[in-house]
Image (cartoon, grey):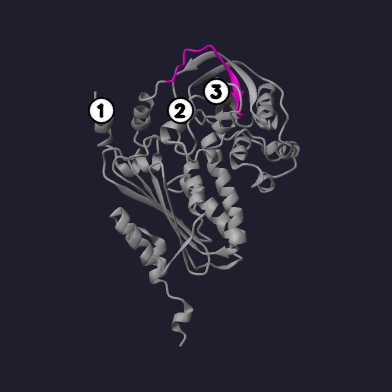
Amino acid sequence: MNSVDEELKSIPVSLCIRCKGAKLLCGKSACPIISKVYLTQSIPVSVNDVAGDSPPSVFVGHYGYPKVRIGPALPIRRGDTEIYERPDQWGQMSIDDIAKLRFSLYRGYKVLPISSPSDPNNYLLELHDLILSAKPVFSEIEYSSTERKIDFSAESQPFGPGGYAKSFYHESSPSNPGVEKIYYDTDLRTVEALRLLYPETSIYTIEKIFSAGMLGKTRSRKIVPTRWSITAVDKILSDRLIQVVREFSEVDGNLYFHHKRIGNEYYILITPGDYSFEMIENWNNGSIWTGPRESIAEGDYEKPGRMVTNPKIAGAFFAAKLPIVEFLNEKERRGNILVIRFIDGDYTMPLGVWQVRENVRTAMQSVYYLDDIDKFFEIIRIRRKVDLRGNSKTYQMIKLQRKITDYVK
């Protein structure tokens, strides 16, 4: 039997970067990279039932769509478990610490049509009640069968093992008033609901209620797989902000930001202009999706009238964009945005795009000024030993595009 590294040699690395284990573009029945990561974990699954305080947490799978697995997740512990569902509080945790935290969330689920929220059964109503809770809730899951599989996704933080729920119980708990009000407003469109919830409500709470089909008009409410809901929320929120940001004046100068954490390094530049957004990911040898193969850079670029809806680099594109347009909205400025992300061998397992969002948000807290865009790429060339000018449409646009004022003497 071939090793995982031998298997990967026959698969183009660009295919893995675009797939990230979700679409099985290589034609295999299971992603060899995810399988390798899974085999390094030792999670006990010989359980008939679990009990503990759910953060609260919910899992929605995507296999079998438009019928999906949906249900609660909980650790086998009591007390304040909110941190299990709050990536914005994981700033000092290592990859191993985060993995152990998330892999200890046991899932229970039943299979429901995605249209179920338009006429929810008792099971889904109980799940909605859990999600509405303002604090962790004691819950119990009794299994009819369990499976060893741990759920990985490039978009969502991982979950531990689970199985089909024979029964599910949770104690009553006070609801989050703001979220409850939106939940019971069945005449409110989803986009408007998100506008009213954010940023007062944590984006990680919004992702859960969006995924469980708790927003929008009654007839249009649908269950959304967890990995898709994360990207959808990022996109909806950032698209709304872009409409506002474009009305502001241009940024004064070339704004430079930088941050590095858990095997990911971010270089961010905002230059004067109308609005454009480009993100380039450089996956280095030894990183999770390249393995022993050569490094590769992939990217996406958008501007008004040509907005990206299905980026090659997947949900990271929208996760990075949201905190940057939030920054521009706060400063009442607009500009051309360029994000370059380096992923190194220290990033040993997919943890979800939350780390893109949170790392970029941290980067935006410290701003520096550069003379021009060449200085930005020169910093990267010196530090990372690679020149990505040829990969960047933003660079080409700034260096080659002429303005009407250039012709006025």
For label 2, the SS is helix
Of marks 3 and 1, which one's residue comes earlier in the chain? 1
Residue at image point 55% right, 48% down: 235
Left or right placement of residue 324 versus residue 383 in this view: right
Question: Gap in Å between the C-alphas at discs 3 and 2?
Answer: 11 Å
Image quarter in which the N terminus is found = top left
Report x, y in % for residue 293. Answer: 26, 41
The quarter holding residue 370 reads bottom left
Magenta highlight on residue 188: no
Of marks 2 and 1, which one's residue comes earlier in the chain? 1
Q: Which residue is mark 1?
A: 3
Of marks 3 and 2, which one's residue comes earlier in the chain? 3
Q: Which residue is mark 3?
A: 75
Give the crowd class for mark 1: few <14, some 14-19, many >=20 residues within 10 Å.
Answer: few
The numbered mark at residue 100 is 2
User: In the depicted view, which residue is nearer to us: 281 or 42?
Assistant: 42
Compared to residue 320, the image places residue 328 above or below, namely below
User: In the depicted view, which residue is nearer to us: 385 or 2?
Assistant: 385
Report the magenta residues as a range. Answer: 43-56
Q: Nearer the viewer, mark 2 or mark 1?
A: 2
- Three-letter amino acid code at disc 2? Lys
For label 1, the SS is loop
- Three-letter amino acid code at disc 3? Pro
Compared to residue 232, the image places residue 329 above or below, namely below
**Residue 344 visible (yes or no):** yes
